[in-house]
Amino acid sequence: MSEEIFLCAICNINSGTCLEDCKFCSQSVRYKADIDRYKQKEMQLILDEARTARDAGALGFCLVTADKGLRPKTLEFVCDVAKTITKEVPQLRLIACNGTASLEQLLVLKEAGIKAYNHNLETSESFYKEICTTHPWSERYETCQNVNKSGLVLITGGIFGLGESEEDRVSMLKSLESLNPTSVPINFYHHNVALELQANPLTVDESLALIRLTRKMIPKAQRIMVAGGRELMFGDRQEEIFENGANSIVVGNYLTTSGRIASKDLDMLKTLNLEVAKKVN
Ligand code: SF4
């Protein structure tokens, strides 16, 4: 395991407007969660967030839209944002996370300066229909295959604590491994009272074991990233994620929930003698 930790920041450039029914997602309009909802974030705000992320040591900057996939207007917007950030904040490595995507759409994003695409499998194929009825898991898998065909770097992972079984977790990790991702973001469900799901039943020890299992089952991945739910799940035991196999974290805020300030994470890494990655391998 590398002693360097890759930091990534996420930017919700469109929020809370999705018509799908993923039961863990407060961005679906169906559940009326109390979150910010907007069609397009202003470019100046996006640039401010990009500069803040760069100054906090982030290398990755992920442009996220809340929709099932890339409508023509969304694709155009993501490309505009990518070109603007490439010009104004060139130190960042741009990632797009815009739902299901065709090979043609991914090639357009690549041309605009996007380097990697994130699309999570979320959970196992068999459990997926319990948490989403509006689109099939197979579309998710196909999008990941399209990413590999496009030459973009594939980032794909999932979310634990939705009520899935241990077999579901192993099945998802096997599916992820079959896609040969460069980075595997794992999320821990952060309960919102507006959602139908029960609160995340996982303990800290079980969650640390899941990081170890992810590392063990996807040994070729360059990065195992602990993404959403880190603060809530690990509390004052967050430093243990690194000794259990994680080498990447999301800094700053998440899509609809607040993270802790980046300086706390940087202090934590310093105390642990872990370097912040300055370039992508
Ligand atoms: S498709 Fe994405 S944004 Fe829409 S509800 Fe599902 S997880 Fe949320």
Image (tube, helix red, strand yellow):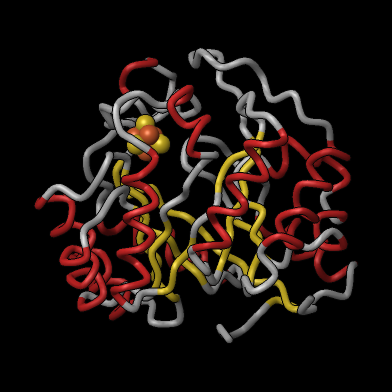
- Position of the C terminus, as image quadrant, is bottom right
How far across and down, in percent of the image, does residue 138 sit?
36, 44
Camera-nearest residue between 149 and 54: 149
Residue drawn at x 14%, y 47% as measured from the top left: 71
Camera-nearest residue between 148 and 16: 148
Instruction: Give left or right: position of 147 versus 166.
Output: left
Instruction: Give left or right: position of 147 versus 252.
Output: left
Residue 83, located in which quarter of the rendered image? bottom left
Residue 28, located in which quarter of the rendered image? top left
Instruction: Give left or right: position of 261 versus 236.
Output: left
On screen, residue 25 above or below 68: above
Residue drawn at x 62%, y 30% as measured from the top left: 190
How far across and down, in percent of the image, does residue 135 sit?
30, 33
Residue drawn at x 52%, y 69% as measured from the top left: 180
How far across and down, in percent of the image, does residue 69 sit?
24, 46
Instruction: Give left or right: position of 143 versus 229.
Output: left
Camera-nearest residue between 56 and 248: 248
- Position of the N terminus, as image quadrant, is bottom right
